C-alpha cells in the first residue's frame, strides 16, 4: 500500500490518495496516518521544472551543472533555492527548482505529524512523459499538464500559450493509476536530495550479528585447536628426542651402572677418562707441540697430577730455551710456572708446571 500525500497550496488543503497494485483504493482530505510508504506530492505551482542534458556518470557533476542552469534562469539568489536532478532514462534529465525555505517548512510540518515521506515528487511528474504533445489529469483537486519538457498546473487562460494551442490528452483512470504507481515506486524526480535527503534508519540485524558471532567463535576455536595440536606435536617430538638421547647416553656408561642422570653420569665418566683439568691427552699434546717448535729442548719427564696439572722435566742446550718453551706454552693458552733451572755439563735442566687457565 502506497499513500500519495498532496501538500497544500493557496487554493486547497492536504489531500491524500492510497494505491495498491490494483489501482486507487481510497482518497480523502487531511493527513493520513504516517508510515514508510507515504510519498509527498509538491504543488505544481511551487516547483519550476526544466529539462537539460546533464552528465550521467557523476551525481555531483550533474547537480553542479543543474545549479548553474538554475542560476541563469531564476531571479531568486541561488542560495535560497533547492535544485535537484532526476532521471527518466532519457538524454535530457528533469531539473526541479524549489524554494529552500518551503522545503524546510513542509518537512517540519510533516515531521510534527509523524510523517517522514519516502520521497517528495513535483505533482506534474506523476503524469507519464508523452512522446509528443501534452497529457493532462485531475488529481486531488488540481489540474496537471505534462509535456516532454514541461510540467505545470493547468490554467484555462495560460495553458493555450504554453501548449501552442494544442489540446492536452486526458489520461484515462487505468493509465493514470499505473503512472502513479510507477512514479511512487521509482520517482522520476525526487526533491529529497542534498540537505533534504531522507536519513536512513540503521537497523541492527540481530540474526546476522548472531551468525557472525558464531562464525567468529568458530574461527577462534579452530585457531586455538590448531595451536593446541601444534603444541602437542612439539611436546611429543621433544619427548621422543629426549628419550632417544637418554637411550644413546646409556650406551656410553659402564655396563651394569645404575642410571639416575644420564647427562651428569656421562660428564663424570668423560672426566674420569680424560683426567681432570683439560685432561692428560689434551695437555700433553699441547706440550709436545711446543717442544717440537723449539729446537734444542727435550722432555726428560712427565707427571700428570690429580688436579689436572702437568709437571715437566725439561733439558735444553741453551739458557734461553726454557724461557722460549714457557712463552710458547703460554701462547697456547696455558698457565706455566717455571722452577729454578741449573746448568751442568753444557745442559740446562729444570722443571715447570703447566696448568689450565
Image (cartoon, helix red, strand yellow):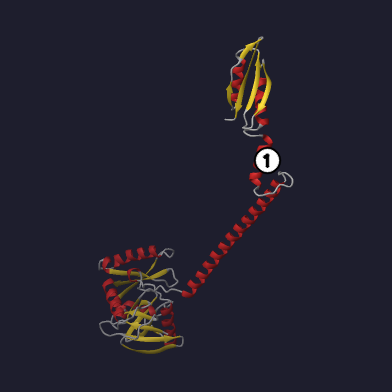
The quarter holding residue 252 reads: top right
The quarter holding residue 291 reads: top right
Q: Is residue 343 above or below residue 142?
A: above
Quarter placement of the C terminus: top right
Report the residue at 68% width, 22% height from top.
301
The answer to whether 228 appears left or right of 270 in the picture is left
According to the image, label 1 marks what residue?
A: 269
Q: Secondary structure at mark 1?
A: helix
The answer to whether 268 appears left or right of 76 in the picture is right
Q: Nearer the viewer, residue 269 or 64?
A: 269
Residue 139 in view (yes/no): no
Q: Nearer the viewer, residue 195 or 286?
A: 286
The quarter holding residue 122 reads: bottom left
Residue 38 in view (yes/no): yes
Report the residue at 46% width, 88% height from top.
22
Quarter placement of the N terminus: bottom left
Report the residue at 55% width, 65% height from top.
221
Q: Position of residue 76 (x, y in %)?
A: 25, 68
Q: Position of residue 38 (x, y in %)?
A: 37, 81
Number of dots carrying numbers: 1
> Residue lying farthest top?
345
The answer to whether 42 appears left or right of 224 in the picture is left
Q: Residues within 10 Å of mark 1 (few under 14, many from 20)?
A: some
Q: Is residue 308 above or below residue 319?
A: below
Q: Is residue 222 above or below residue 316?
A: below
Report the residue at 29% width, 74% height from top.
103
Q: Is residue 100 above or below residue 285?
A: below
Q: Nearer the viewer, residue 74 or 24?
A: 24
Q: Position of residue 223 (x, y in %)?
A: 56, 62
Q: Position of residue 115 (x, y in %)?
A: 33, 80
Amino acid at each position: 500500500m502506497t499513500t500519495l500525500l498532496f501538500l497544500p497550496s493557496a487554493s486547497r488543503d492536504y489531500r491524500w490518495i492510497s494505491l495498491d497494485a490494483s489501482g486507487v483504493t481510497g482518497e480523502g482530505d487531511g493527513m493520513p496516518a504516517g508510515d514508510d510508504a507515504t510519498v509527498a506530492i509538491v504543488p505544481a505551482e511551487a516547483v519550476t521544472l526544466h529539462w537539460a542534458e546533464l552528465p550521467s556518470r557523476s551525481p555531483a557533476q550533474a547537480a553542479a551543472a543543474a545549479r548553474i542552469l538554475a542560476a541563469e534562469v531564476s531571479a531568486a539568489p541561488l542560495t535560497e533555492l533547492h535544485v535537484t536532478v532526476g532521471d527518466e532514462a532519457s538524454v535530457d534529465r528533469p531539473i526541479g527548482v524549489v524554494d529552500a525555505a518551503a522545503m524546510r517548512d513542509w518537512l517540519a510540518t510533516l515531521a510534527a505529524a509523524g510523517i517522514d515521506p519516502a520521497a517528495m515528487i513535483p505533482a506534474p511528474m506523476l503524469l507519464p512523459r508523452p512522446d509528443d504533445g501534452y497529457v493532462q489529469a485531475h488529481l486531488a483537486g488540481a489540474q496537471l499538464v505534462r509535456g516532454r519538457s514541461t510540467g505545470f498546473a493547468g490554467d484555462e487562460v495560460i495553458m493555450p500559450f504554453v501548449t501552442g494551442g494544442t489540446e492536452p490528452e486526458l489520461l484515462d483512470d487505468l493509465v493514470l493509476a499505473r503512472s502513479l504507481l510507477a512514479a511512487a515506486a521509482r520517482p522520476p524526480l525526487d526533491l529529497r536530495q542534498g540537505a533534504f535527503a531522507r536519513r536512513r534508519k540503521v537497523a541492527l540485524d540481530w540474526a546476522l550479528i548472531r551468525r557472525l558471532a558464531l562464525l567468529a567463535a568458530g574461527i577462534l576455536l579452530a585457531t586455538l585447536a590448531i595451536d593446541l595440536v601444534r603444541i602437542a606435536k612439539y611436546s611429543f617430538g621433544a619427548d621422543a628426542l629426549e628419550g632417544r638421547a637418554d637411550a644413546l647416553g646409556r650406551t656410553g656408561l659402564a655396563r651394569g651402572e645404575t642410571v639416575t642422570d644420564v647427562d651428569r653420569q656421562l660428564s663424570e665418566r668423560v672426566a674420569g677418562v680424560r683426567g681432570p683439568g683439560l685432561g692428560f691427552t689434551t695437555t700433553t699434546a699441547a706440550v709436545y707441540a711446543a717442544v717440537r717448535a723449539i729446537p734444542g729442548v727435550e722432555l726428560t719427564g712427565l707427571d700428570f697430577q690429580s688436579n689436572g696439572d702437568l709437571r715437566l722435566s725439561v733439558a735444553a742446550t741453551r739458557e734461553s730455551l726454557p724461557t722460549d718453551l714457557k712463552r710458547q706454552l703460554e701462547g697456547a693458552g696455558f698457565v706455566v710456572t717455571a722452577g729454578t733451572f741449573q746448568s751442568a755439563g753444557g745442559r740446562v735442566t729444570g722443571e715447570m708446571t703447566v696448568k689450565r687457565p
